[in-house]
Structures are given as structure tokens and as C-alpha cells.
Image: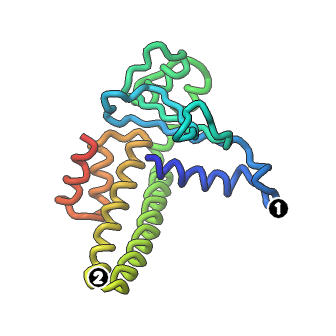
């Protein structure tokens, strides 16, 4: 997840927070928010925020303007605000009646789920991601081959496909799918064998 946050932050800075011709001094504060419904670890909290601190002195925080937030709806929201409690319900596909913002969110979720064209766009996004990752895997394989590891090409491709399947699986879960739904989604894409998919899914159980 940490590397995904780093990736999203780079895209955010490139596209939104720094205009052409400006310097790093013009960077706006950035917030990366992950809405997750993963099976929590023992010490996971409903809401956690992260910043950059000194390894030697935790009292020193690097003022880089970046805040990373993880909200896990599978952890109790007891003690949180009414808005956050309602968000947890929304993430868990439970009905929410709080304000117009949640009414709008539920309406849009329903529209997206029922719109074949939008679902197709999501599939296209996943396919493009697959193509990009496969291209990276081929390059890694060629490098391995050049270094004398003759099996590098096929090994790179195989590992690349598993990495892609993992990214797509996590993407589906992050977007509110259950593990079963996410698994079926990846299986239908036929990226990796059912056996490799079973091994991958075990990580999230």
C-alpha cells in the first residue's frame, strides 16, 4: 500500500498541485486518502494518518505538506464523528441517512453499478494497467536475459502478470468489492491461472 500511495502522490503533484513553470515552492498541500475494507490486522485502527518523521528523533516532522490517511471500514468506528460512522456504513454497502452528500454518493454508486458503459470503462482502465505492467515485465525480463539469466524473459512475464493481478484485486477491494467479488473479477480477466489466483487470494484471507 505504501508504494501505491507514493505512486498516487506523484500523479497528484504532476497533474494538480504544480502548474507549468512553477517551482517546488508552489506545491500545494496534498492528502492521499485510502478507503479500505480489508480484513484488519490486530493493531489496525479505523482511522490512521501518516506523516514523514526523522528516524532518529520522532519529535521532528518533515514539513513536506503531505498527509496520508487510511480508513478501514472493517474496524469499529466507535468514538468517531457521525460523518465517519456514516462513511463506514457506505463503504460496507449499508444504507446511510445523514445528509445530502451521502444521498448523492449512494445515488452515484447505484448509477455506476447499473451502467454497463461505466463498468466497461472500468474494465478498460484495468486492461490498460495490465498492458503497462506487462510491458514493464518484458523489459525486466530482457534485462535479466542480458545479465545471463536465460529464463529471465518468461520469469519476468510470469511475475509481472501476478503483480498485475494483485494490483487489480486490491483495486477492486479498495473500490468496495468483497474479496469474493474481486476474485471473480480477476478470474474473468484470465490474467493468471486459477491456481496462481488461489495462492494470491490466500494473502487477503
Query: What is the residue that sits farthest to the left in this orientation?
Result: 195
Picture layout, residue 166 above or below residue 55: below
Seen at 50% across and 40% down, the residue is 111
Label 1 Cα neighbours within 10 Å, binned few <14 / some 14-19 / many ≥20: few
Q: Earlier in the sequence, mark 1 or mark 2?
A: 1
Q: Percent from the top left, x then y, of residue 155?
A: 28, 74
Seen at 67% across and 43% down, the residue is 64
Picture layout, residue 146 above or below residue 103: below
Label 2 Cα neighbours within 10 Å, binned few <14 / some 14-19 / many ≥20: few
Name the secondary structure under disc 1.
loop
Picture layout, residue 79 above or below residue 149: above
Q: Percent from the top left, x then y, of residue 6?
A: 54, 51
The label number, if any, that marks residue 149 in the structure image? 2
Query: What is the residue that sits farthest to the top in this orientation?
Result: 79
Q: Quadrant of residue 140?
A: bottom left
Residue assigned mark 1: 21
- Mark 1 → mark 2, Cα distance in angstroms: 44 Å
Q: Percent from the top left, x then y, of residue 68?
A: 55, 38
Along the line of sight, which residue is nearer the eye, 200 or 192? 200
Picture layout, residue 94 above or below residue 184: above
Q: Quadrant of residue 50?
A: top right
Amino acid at each position: 500500500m505504501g508504494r501505491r500511495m507514493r505512486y498516487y502522490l506523484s500523479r497528484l503533484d504532476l497533474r494538480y498541485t504544480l502548474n507549468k513553470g512553477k517551482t517546488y515552492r508552489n506545491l500545494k498541500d496534498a492528502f492521499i486518502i485510502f478507503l479500505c475494507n480489508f480484513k484488519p490486522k490486530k493493531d489496525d485502527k479505523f482511522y490512521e494518518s501518516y506523516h514523514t518523521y526523522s528516524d532518529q528523533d520522532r519529535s521532528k516532522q518533515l514539513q513536506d505538506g503531505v498527509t496520508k490517511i487510511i480508513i478501514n471500514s472493517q474496524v469499529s468506528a466507535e468514538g468517531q464523528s457521525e460523518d465517519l460512522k456514516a462513511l463506514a456504513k457506505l463503504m460496507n454497502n449499508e444504507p446511510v441517512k445523514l445528509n445530502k452528500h451521502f444521498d448523492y454518493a449512494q445515488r452515484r454508486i447505484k448509477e455506476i453499478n447499473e451502467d454497463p458503459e461505466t463498468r466497461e470503462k472500468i474494465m478498460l482502465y484495468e486492461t490498460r494497467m495490465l498492458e503497462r505492467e506487462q510491458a514493464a515485465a518484458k523489459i525486466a525480463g530482457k534485462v535479466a536475459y542480458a545479465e545471463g539469466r536465460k529464463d529471465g524473459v518468461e520469469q519476468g512475464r510470469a511475475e509481472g502478470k501476478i503483480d498485475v493481478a494483485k494490483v487489480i484485486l486490491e483495486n477492486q477491494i479498495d473500490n468496495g468489492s468483497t474479496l469474493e467479488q474481486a476474485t471473480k473479477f480477476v478470474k474473468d480477466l484470465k490474467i493468471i491461472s486459477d491456481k496462481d489466483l488461489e495462492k494470491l487470494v490466500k494473502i487477503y484471507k
